[in-house]
Image (cartoon, coloured by chain):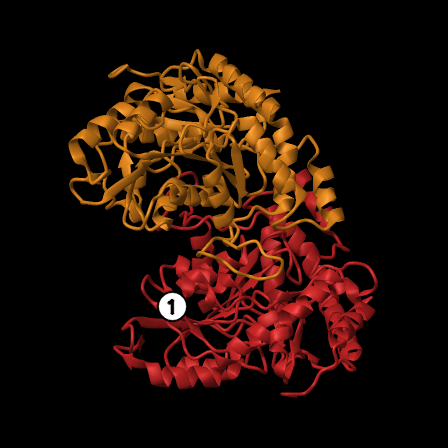
Chain colours: A red, B orange
């Protein structure tokens, strides 16, 4: 494709092919769909007076999340960033540690590390999954880190590298087996950022359940929403208890005394938001089905468009296709902004992938591996409208 | 009262006098009341698809909060702890600073300091307001701190003391004029913790508007609730802009790029919770009226009970009477748990004041002033049922 003379009309062809799927009117990148018991459950909250940090919908949402994902325990929290921050602490991350994070991620992944007083250490992504690349990770750690005193140390900074955070980009699962293998070898705890992958399976098991701890997000733009919300998943009952304790101000059980045994967080998910979550969770299988149908539609519509491909689920995976993603092929990197302009001008809300973490002011001095794949993905990926209702 | 022989029946008299107000059935400490547009506004969220971090109810809630309190700006956030943490940062609190905080407060006040990487430094409370005592504060700072290099330094630890956090306990305003005077003299920024005092006035101005920054909470047990929520109040437009930026992942405005100029927070209040807040705010004047009537009822009912007094609003203040509070007089300190047992056994949900901060494991080594008043208050204060519906 390099050097190929492209038709001046390919961008218009792309816009047309997307609009053939989304219809003639303006269309959002992702909007939630409320077609179930949302109002009934919200009304139950109001009528029962339980809207806040304790209530039956919080318990029910946690039980249903565990059932759906197959995790032994789910702890509902106020959002995905809070879930990640506490997950880091559960994984033993301490002030001054480094945590391996993909450079290609939403800023929350790096912020959660920062909010623990730790330092994100950026690693490269895979062209096949858009997630953390286990081969590049191993090469980088062999070169730049060493096991010493039972821990992995960054040879350059001397700091302990405590954990690795695979993130399932746009809902497409990372190569978890290979990542777990590297983590075992280098004594890293795995915190799995499944904020985008509720409903996505890797080798028939739900994402978020492979690491020591996993996290979910239910922000308004996610596959299901609680307004704002998140959850911590784990198979370890002690970590689950600790997660609940840390996120509820670390208050000790007592009939009336207010005793807190550590500096905890106010990260509880209100019952009101959990009520919305329970109603949304009932519709999740249908949402995922529709999002997969939408991917098939886009794939068909784009088959005739030069220079562009739709990102498809990696082999052995069942993706939720949270955000539908196209990749500009070959030498079209510099055309990204032209495509974004044309799509958004045509009322088709679209966005590039996130600015890479090491290109952001707060993280420009963080340690990092070579990032050739992430750098290329930053210039060539575009998310297009992905709401489940678009499947028709 | 010291040494007075008390009737063995005084505890039963107290239980009876409280039940005379609350009625025969079991009664909660504080429950929300949803008698307005709650369901209509929640339905509007669902029907409009705006439930998450952006939406018309967030803007409206902020405007209405500013109007009600008289602050120039209100920024809605996910809860009161988040509001306090960001307020500290706005007040210039940095890692390693000390922040003056009453020992008698809910743990969130100290946790917010801790989550900034700073150290809470505990000071004493006043018998008259139950809030930070400006006289004791001045005496303590004159003895233990010195102005050096333009900042106040703790002579003992060498650390900078950056701010002071008056908290309006149970809705009763602190002596703000005197506290502001001490703060000016010792170059301390004032972060006003008004989590409990929405609707409370000090010299006819709303609490939370006297310091550089103030904070509110709308937890389920507060005078109005959003499920979980809080707000930052300020009269400084630059601080308001900074508060909004920091609490919304510090994303720079752009048509599609994801650029964040510092490590921000995901502390947005979802539109769903703001909708509840808008409906609750419409009823706030009525709630405060009822809570003041309830105080008058308790006061009348308890007039005949030995050894106990109801805490009344300080002179020059208009209190929201968030939590109704009794004080065991004289030598009855050791009777606190007996009273709590009798009340709770009778179905009258009651609680002591919080365990003092320096008695908690995470803060036992924090710097502190002498705390004789707080120590006495810890042993003698009890909160009794306070819901607005109890006023009849």
Q: In this view, does B351 lie above or below A372?
A: above
**Going 77% across and 76% down the picture, which residue do you hit?**
A9
Q: In this view, does B280 lie above or below B6?
A: below
Q: Name the residue under label 1.
A: A366
**Can you give x and y, in whole percent of width and height, for residue A115 in the image?**
41, 57
**Going 38% across and 15% down the picture, which residue do you hit?**
B306
Q: Is residue A312 left or right of residue B266?
A: right
Nearer the observer, A152 or A333: A333
**Going 45% across and 43% down the picture, which residue do you hit?**
B81
Rendered-image quadrant of the N terminus of chain A = bottom right
Rendered-image quadrant of the C terminus of chain A = bottom right
> Around disc 1, counting alpha carbons within 10 Å, would you say few (fewer than 14), some (14 to 19), or many (20 or more)?
few
Q: In this view, does B213 lie to the left or right of B66?
A: left
Q: Is residue A74 left or right of residue B5?
A: right
Nearer the observer, B13 or B84: B84
**Going 74% across and 52% down the picture, which residue do you hit?**
A37
The picture quadrant where one finds residue A24 is: bottom right
Tag count = 1
**Can you give x and y, in whole percent of width and height, for residue B226 in the image?**
59, 40
Q: Which chain is indicated by disc 1? A: A
**Can you give x and y, in whole percent of width and height, for residue A240 in the image?**
47, 62
């Amino acid at each position: 494709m390099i050097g190929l003379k492209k038709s001046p009309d390919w961008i218009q062809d792309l816009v047309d092919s997307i609009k053939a799927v989304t219809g003639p009117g303006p269309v959002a990148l992702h909007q939630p769909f409320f077609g179930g018991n949302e109002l009934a459950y919200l009304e139950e909250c109001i009528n029962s007076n339980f809207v806040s940090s304790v209530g039956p919908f919080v318990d029910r949402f946690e039980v249903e999340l565990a059932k759906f994902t197959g995790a032994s325990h789910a702890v509902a929290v106020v959002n995905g960033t809070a879930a990640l921050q506490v997950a880091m602490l559960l994984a033993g991350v301490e002030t001054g540690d480094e945590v391996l994070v993909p450079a290609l991620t939403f800023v929350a992944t790096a912020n959660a590390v920062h909010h623990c007083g730790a330092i994100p250490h950026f690693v490269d992504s895979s062209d096949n999954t858009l997630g953390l690349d286990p081969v590049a990770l191993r090469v980088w750690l062999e070169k730049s880190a060493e096991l010493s005193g039972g821990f992995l140390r960054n040879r350059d900074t001397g700091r302990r590298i405590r954990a690795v955070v695979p993130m399932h980009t746009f809902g497409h699962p990372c190569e978890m087996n290979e990542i777990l293998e590297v983590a075992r070898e280098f004594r890293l705890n795995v915190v799995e950022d499944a904020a985008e992958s509720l409903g996505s399976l890797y080798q028939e098991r739900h994402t978020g359940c492979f690491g020591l701890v996993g996290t979910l997000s239910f922000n308004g733009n996610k596959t299901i929403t609680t307004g704002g919300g998140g959850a911590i998943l784990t198979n370890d009952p002690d970590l689950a208890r600790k997660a609940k304790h840390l996120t509820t101000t670390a208050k000790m059980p007592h009939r009336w005394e207010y005793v807190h045994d550590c500096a905890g967080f106010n990260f509880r998910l209100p019952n009101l938001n959990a009520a919305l979550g329970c109603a949304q969770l009932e519709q999740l299988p249908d949402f995922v089905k529709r999002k997969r149908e939408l991917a098939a539609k886009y794939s068909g519509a784009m088959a005739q468009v030069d220079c562009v491909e739709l990102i498809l689920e990696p082999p052995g995976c069942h993706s939720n296709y949270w955000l539908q993603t196209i990749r500009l092929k070959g030498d079209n990197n510099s055309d990204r902004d032209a495509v974004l302009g044309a799509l958004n001008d045509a009322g088709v809300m679209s966005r590039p992938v996130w600015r890479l973490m090491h290109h952001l002011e707060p993280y420009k001095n963080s340690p990092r591996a070579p990032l050739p794949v992430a750098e290329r993905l930053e210039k060539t990926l575009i998310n297009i409208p992905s709401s489940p209702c678009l499947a028709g």
